[in-house]
Amino acid sequence: MEITSNWTEVGSGKVHCLAAGPEDGRPVVLLHGASFSARTWQEIGTLEVLTEAGYRAIAVDLPGFGESPPAEADFSTWLGELLDQLRLAPPVVVSPSMSGRLSLPLVTGNPERVSGFVAVAPVTIPAHADKLGQVAAPVLAIWGENDHLVPQKHADLLVERAPHAAKVVIPAAGHAPYMNDPAAFHEALLEFLGGLPQ
C-alpha cells in the first residue's frame, strides 16, 4: 500500500495530509482528536483497511497537530475550505472528539458537502442541536461504552435529530474507541460505508 504525504493551504496555514487508496475511490476524510494526528490512522491500520476496500483515504493533520504548523483557524469554515483545496467529491467525514468543532458546522450548515458523517464522540453536538435535522447525509455515531468525556446522550441527540442516523457502541472502549478496539471500529466503519448510496 502506497501512502503519500501531501500539503495544501487553508487560509493562512499549511495543512499536511496522508493519502492512500485509488484516486477514483469514494473519498473518506479522517480528522482526529486532541491526542492524535493523521499518523494515528496509519498506525492502527485504518488507511490500510480503507484502501483494501477500495476507498480513497485522506488523513488530515489539524492545525498545530502532527506536521501541520499552528495557524489561526475559523472553525465554522475551515473544513469546507480544506475540501475546496483537496478538490474532492463529497466525502465521508470521520470526526472524533475535538474535530467536532470543525465538522459539525459543515455537516449542519452545508450538508450537501458530505456524503456521510461518522461521528466518533465529537464535541459540540448540543451546540448544534437546532440544526441537526439539516444533516442530509447518512450518519453513524460511534461511541465507546466507557466514554466519560462525551456522554452517550450526545450520540442519542444526534441520532434522534439527524434524518438518517444510527449508533454503534463499542464494548469496554473509552473516548477513543478506535484505539481501544480498532477491529470493532473498522468493522462498524466498513459496514456503514458499504451501505451508502453510490
Image (spheres, helix red, strand yellow):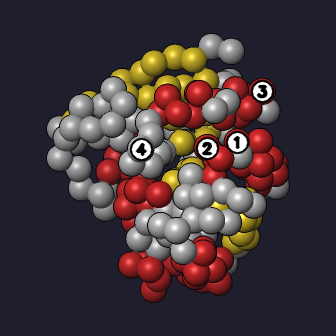
Mark 4 lies on a secondary structure that is loop
Classify 7 as above or below 97: above
| Residue for badge 1 | 182
> Which disc is residue 35 wearing?
4
Residue 179 in picture, x, y percent from top left: 61, 43
- Residue at figure coordinates x 33%, y 36% from the top left: 65
Residue drawn at (44%, 66%) of the image:
123
Place of residue 185 in the rendered image (x, y in percent of width and height, measured from the top left): 72, 48
Q: Which of marks 1 and 3 is nearer the N terminus?
A: 3
Q: How far apart are marks 1 and 3 (CA)?
A: 16 Å
Numbered disc in front, either 4 or 3 = 4
Ranked by sequence position, the earlier of labels 4 and 1 is 4
Residue type at tag 2: Met
Q: What residue type is labelled 1?
A: Pro
What residue does disc 3 label? 52
Which tag, 4 or 3, sits closer to the chain's start? 4
Looking at the image, residue 98 lies above or below residue 150:
above
Residue at mark 2: 179
